[in-house]
Image: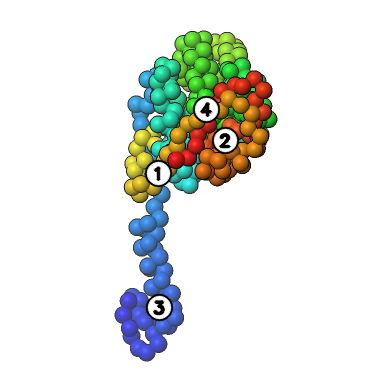
Amino acid sequence: MVACEEGAVKKGNKELSLKEGREASKTNVFSKQKENYYKLYAPEIPLNLDFCAEKVPVKKNYVYEKLDREFLVNMYWQSQTFLFIKRAHKWFPVIEPILAKNNIPNDFKYLALIESGLENVVSPSGAKGFWQFMPKTAKGLGLEVNEFVDERYNVEKATQAACEYLNDAHEKFNSWTLAAASYNMGKGGLNNRLTQQKVSSYYDLLLNKETSRYIYRILAVKTILNNPKQYGFNIADNSDYKQPEYKKIGVDSTVTDFVSFAKEMNITYNELKYLNPWLRDKSLPNPTNKSYIIKIMN
């Protein structure tokens, strides 16, 4: 673009006003920015995926399409996936050794991630915590659940309970993939579907929408978190979330006021609840002198 006379510019053989020339210039700059910075990419789906060393039949059309959906959702819901990566850095080191101790494959940490986003969330049906236990299931697995203590919010204890469920499910189905699916829809419900449809693989089952997406979501999140830069996620050094430093103390008597208790420990009530979200009230009646372990910020 070159000037031709005062107040005008020339574009090719066309003479433009100065204002039109400026607008044309802006358009060209924006077009170049779009070309360089506004490109979107569909991910390439790996063909050698597995869950707990159980192969995924990616070459089946419907399997590929379901995987593709979950990769796209998690790639382009960037804020959520960034938070997944940051929280995983904080919580996977807590979850992994408990899985290993119980002979549960490491891939199940991604099940906790898609269940809750590694937050102590509450579902519309009342499931709570990282592992999203309903009250009856939690109690059946040995967790204490009442108005003062809810161990679904205790990550270590809830992970141990999840391991017990998963080992039982694996014994029943002889498949970690089916054990994971049963975590979403229940062992009885999954067994009924397998019997009715006369198949033995999760990938051959026709299931409800949530369970039919379940394993694919785990696979997508697992793949992206193992290769974040490949999928466009770049995180600055030292910006991941970390566990705070704390010590543990035993409590085997009634605590009448956790605000005063926290002050005696030289921490705030907020810090006490941050480290011990399973304490659900401002007090803890303990007539049986049960022993509890409470984390205290250093």
* Residue at x-position 40% and y-position 55%: 38
Vertical order, 151 against 175 (above or below): below
> Which of marks 4 and 1 precedes in the sequence?
1
| Local SS, label 3 | helix
Residue of label 1: 240
The spot of residue 274 in percent (x, y) is 54, 40
> Which of marks 1 and 3 precedes in the sequence?
3
Residue nearer the viewer, 112 or 52: 112
Residue of label 4: 250
Is residue 280 shown left or right of residue 29? right
- In three-dimensional space, the C-alpha distance between marks 1 and 4, rounded to whole angstroms, equals 30 Å
Residue of label 2: 277
Residue nearer the viewer, 133 or 297: 297
The spot of residue 199 in percent (x, y) is 51, 12
Vertical order, 124 against 23 (above or below): above
* Tag of residue 249: none
Tag in front: 2 or 1 = 2
* Mark 3 in CB contact with mark 2 (< 8 angstroms): no
- In three-dimensional space, the C-alpha distance between marks 4 and 2, rounded to whole angstroms, equals 16 Å
* Residue at x-position 37% and y-position 89%: 6
| Local SS, label 1 | loop
Residue of label 3: 21
Amino acid type shown at disc 3:
Gly
